[in-house]
Amino acid sequence: MIDRRMTLAGMVSTLLAAPASAAAPLTARAVFAEIRRASGQKWDPNPTDDRIIFGNRAAPVTGIATCFTASLDVLRRAQAAGLNYIIPHEASFFERYDDFAESALPDHDPVIRAKQAFVTGHGMVIQRMHGHAHSRPGDAIMTGLLRQLDWDVYRAADKPGLPWIVLPQTSALNVGRHIKARLGRRTLRMLGDPSRSISTISVSAGMPGENVQIQQLESGADAVLLGEVREPEVLGYAQDLAESRKVTVFLSGHTGEDPGMGILAEWLKTVFPALPVQWLGMVDPYSNPA
């Protein structure tokens, strides 16, 4: 007859020998809460860019992808890599704040419906991170751009509150070719004489507004690197400025902010060491027909 104490002892030893069950996966809601906590920043509770835009907040997170924008191409790449928590820098649904009520497109628009169906069908969640990416220490977006350009070592005192780069004297053409190659551009626009010798460059990214960009042109830099511009105001000023002081303008487009999401991915790896985290850099959507 089996002794009762022996039976209990056997049950205890069996339980102790059994491997611990894997921790339950984090939900999208929990991941978002931890991002907010770990950021150390104040998150405005009012409607803002930086929130879960679309998807089931209770979905278990299998991995995190950062990107410039959650295009269908990026979503497919994320799905293939097993990453279902998508963090784009810019809007995903074709309205500045991803506000469906403010969108010029109807809810039944086929492009919106197709993207929503893909996200839902693959258990994905989209959480934008715009303002808080810029306001991370050093501005993650600018840090990523300068690192991608290999210009972080050439950064001098900022003017006017923007990175001021001092390069060894070289031609505008060489600088333009460097920007194009380092940012993986198939095309790059440049205003000014390609043979002109330049050294100092004022850098901005995205679209900080025409007033900021005109201040860059007024700063005395030999050249400016801009993202997206209002051409009549900014390039119009640059053309008229050339009557008294020449300045070279390089236009990288708004997508120049993309490498900054790689910096964000590096930070998120420290926040979620048990989750795969990957920056999915975008492919340059433009080409040169020449």
Image: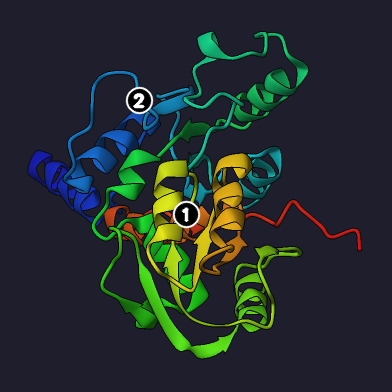
Q: Position of residue 170 (x, y in %)?
A: 56, 89
Q: Residue at x 36, y 71 (%)?
A: 164
Q: Residue at x 24, y 50 (%)?
A: 14
Q: Which amino acid type corresponds to the residue marked 2 in the rendered image? A: Thr
| Residue underneath mark 2 | 48
Quarter in which the N terminus is drawn: top left
Q: Is residue 132 above or below residue 242?
A: above
Q: Residues within 10 Å of mark 1 (few under 14, many from 20)?
A: many
Callouts 1 and 2 close, C-beta under 8 Å = no
Choose between 223 and 175: the one closer to the eye: 223
Q: Residue at x 47, y 64 (%)?
A: 145
Q: Residues within 10 Å of mark 2 (few under 14, many from 20)?
A: some
For residue 232, the mark is none
Is 114 left or right of 214, judged from the image as shown? right
Q: Position of residue 12 (x, y in %)?
A: 16, 47
User: Dividing the picture into quarters, in which one does residue 46 lie?
Assistant: top left
Instruction: Tell me the distance, in whole angstroms, between the alpha carbons under discs 1 and 2.
Output: 20 Å
SS type, badge 1: loop
For residue 205, the mark is 1
Residue lying furthest left in this view? 5
Is 158 left or right of 101, judged from the image as shown? left
Residue 268 visible somewhere in the drawing: yes
Choose between 125 and 73: the one closer to the eye: 73
SS type, badge 2: loop
User: Dividing the picture into quarters, in which one does residue 242 lie?
Assistant: bottom right
Q: Is residue 80 above or below residue 175?
A: above
